[in-house]
Image: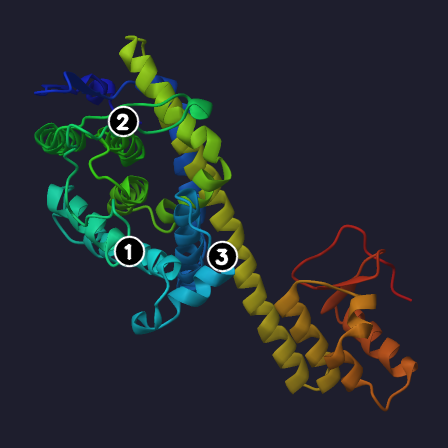
């Protein structure tokens, strides 16, 4: 486990107009030791799976789910299926604003993934500005000013949050203060990294303080989550850093509330003020890694099943009709017999055949254990074994 020395590293900045701002770890290392170990254990299990076999498919799914998640958090209206379709388009075909939002997030991810594996890369201001430029480009909105740090005029006050989720917060308003704070955050993170602070602690802390600085008029949430993911990617965590956006979306009230919880605890001088957000992040990483581990195992099982049914057809253990049925099962996961009988593709298979042939085909699939029938008359592929199996007759 990491040394506790890094927990004492802090940086206080006296701004011109906002007053003092303190960057602090705000946790006791031993208080999250167990949570850290659980994440590392989950990570070890995940990377031990044969990822290379399904890497392309997994990465595509993670990117789509993450873009959907982080976009929805900020009010995006695209469904996950629509997001997948849009990300597969040629950029020249993207015309609508909602589509552009998704494509922009993907562009920021691409930059993040590239830099995270670049030797010697470290968090810097240009990277943050580039992320914001990519995320906000070509989106018509009065507050979308790509790569321009916020500098509120006297007649405008920026607030963050709402009363229902922990209260409203007035971040720094003056552009010079914002730039200095952003540079101080990067400096402080560098000191933590040099002291051996784990990325699992550094990343959420940078996320937390970045959102408190709130350096842009719009796009801060999206940029903050990509920064967090990049720090984790650079430390060797794959897939999970971006997939974490789904966890934040699923726990959106807690996610927003914890920014205020930690800020208020620090303002009151409470001990370990940042522990709630770091603990929340660690639990998210653990759940995300476990979910990815399960997904990889299922993807591999599906590929093996696909190979098994192809071989069964080639060796004439099953006929073309049966192969079509199990191929549909592979695609859909399960089919009720009622649904099966009403399906046009299934009806066409037996258009000139008797019911006895239909029953014999299904029974043969079950005998070969290529399919299972449960007591609710649902047919399952063999890589998913239901608990309530119906005895074969």
In which image quadrant can residue 347 be found? bottom right
Sequence-first disc among 1 and 3: 3
Q: Secondary structure at mark 2?
A: loop
Sequence-first disc among 1 and 2: 2
Q: Between tags 1 and 3, which lies in front?
A: 1
Q: Can you give x and y, in whole percent of width and height, for residue 170 in the image? A: 26, 23
Q: Secondary structure at mark 3?
A: helix
Q: Is residue 9 left or right of residue 289?
A: left
Q: Which residue is mark 1?
A: 139
- Residue located 21% across and 39% down the image: 216
Q: Which residue is mark 3?
A: 80
Q: Between tags 3 and 2, which lies in front?
A: 3
- Residue located 35% across and 59% down the image: 97
Tag 3 near tag 2, CB within 8 Å: no
Q: Which residue is mark 2?
A: 2
Nearer to me, 281 or 2: 281
Q: Can you give x and y, in whole percent of width and height, for residue 358 in the image? A: 85, 79
Nearer to me, 155 or 339: 155
Number of residues whose C-alpha sits closer than 10 Å to that of mark 1, classed few (under 14), some (14–19) or many (20 or more): some
Number of residues whose C-alpha sits closer than 10 Å to that of mark 2, classed few (under 14), some (14–19) or many (20 or more): few
In which image quadrant can residue 32 be found? top left
Q: Is residue 332 left or right of residue 1?
A: right
Check the picture and name the quadrant holding the C terminus: bottom right
Q: Can you give x and y, in whole percent of width and height, for residue 260 in the image? A: 36, 22
Q: Can you give x and y, in whole percent of width and height, for residue 331 in the image? A: 62, 69
């Amino acid at each position: 486990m990491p040394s506790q020395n890094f927990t004492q590293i802090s940086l206080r900045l006296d701004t011109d107009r906002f007053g003092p701002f303190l960057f602090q770890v705000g946790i006791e290392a031993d208080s999250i030791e167990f949570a850290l170990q659980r994440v590392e254990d989950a990570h070890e299990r995940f990377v031990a799976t044969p990822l290379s076999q399904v890497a392309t498919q997994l990465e595509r799914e993670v990117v789509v789910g993450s873009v959907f998640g982080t976009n929805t958090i900020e009010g995006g209206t695209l469904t996950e299926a629509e997001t997948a379709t849009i990300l597969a388009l040629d950029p020249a075909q993207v015309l609508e604003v909602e589509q552009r939002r998704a494509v922009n997030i993907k562009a920021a991810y691409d930059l993040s993934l590239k830099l995270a594996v670049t030797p010697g890369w470290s968090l810097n201001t240009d990277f943050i500005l580039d992320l914001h430029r990519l995320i906000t480009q070509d989106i018509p909105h009065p507050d979308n000013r790509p790569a321009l740090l916020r500098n509120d005029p006297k007649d405008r006050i920026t607030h963050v949050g709402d009363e229902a989720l922990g209260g409203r917060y007035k971040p720094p308003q003056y552009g010079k203060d914002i730039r200095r704070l952003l540079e101080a955050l990067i400096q402080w993170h560098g000191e933590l990294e040099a002291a051996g602070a784990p990325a699992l602690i550094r990343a959420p802390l940078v996320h937390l303080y970045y959102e408190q600085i709130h350096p842009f008029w719009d796009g801060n949430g999206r940029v903050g989550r990509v920064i967090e993911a990049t720090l984790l990617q650079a430390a060797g965590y794959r897939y999970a850093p971006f997939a974490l956006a789904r966890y934040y979306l699923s726990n959106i009230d807690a996610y927003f509330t914890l920014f205020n919880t930690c800020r208020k605890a620090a303002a009151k001088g409470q001990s370990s003020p940042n522990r709630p957000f770091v603990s929340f992040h660690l639990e998210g990483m653990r759940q995300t890694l476990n979910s990815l581990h399960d997904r990889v195992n299922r993807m591999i099982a599906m590929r093996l099943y696909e190979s098994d049914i192809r071989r069964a057809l080639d060796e004439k253990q099953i006929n073309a009709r049966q192969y079509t049925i199990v191929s549909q099962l592979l695609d859909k996961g399960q089919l009720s017999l009622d649904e099966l009988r009403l399906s046009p593709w299934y009806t066409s298979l037996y258009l000139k055949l008797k019911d006895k042939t239909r029953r014999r085909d299904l029974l043969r699939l079950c005998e070969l254990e290529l399919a299972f029938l449960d007591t609710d008359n649902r047919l399952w592929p063999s890589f998913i074994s239901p608990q309530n199996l119906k005895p074969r007759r």
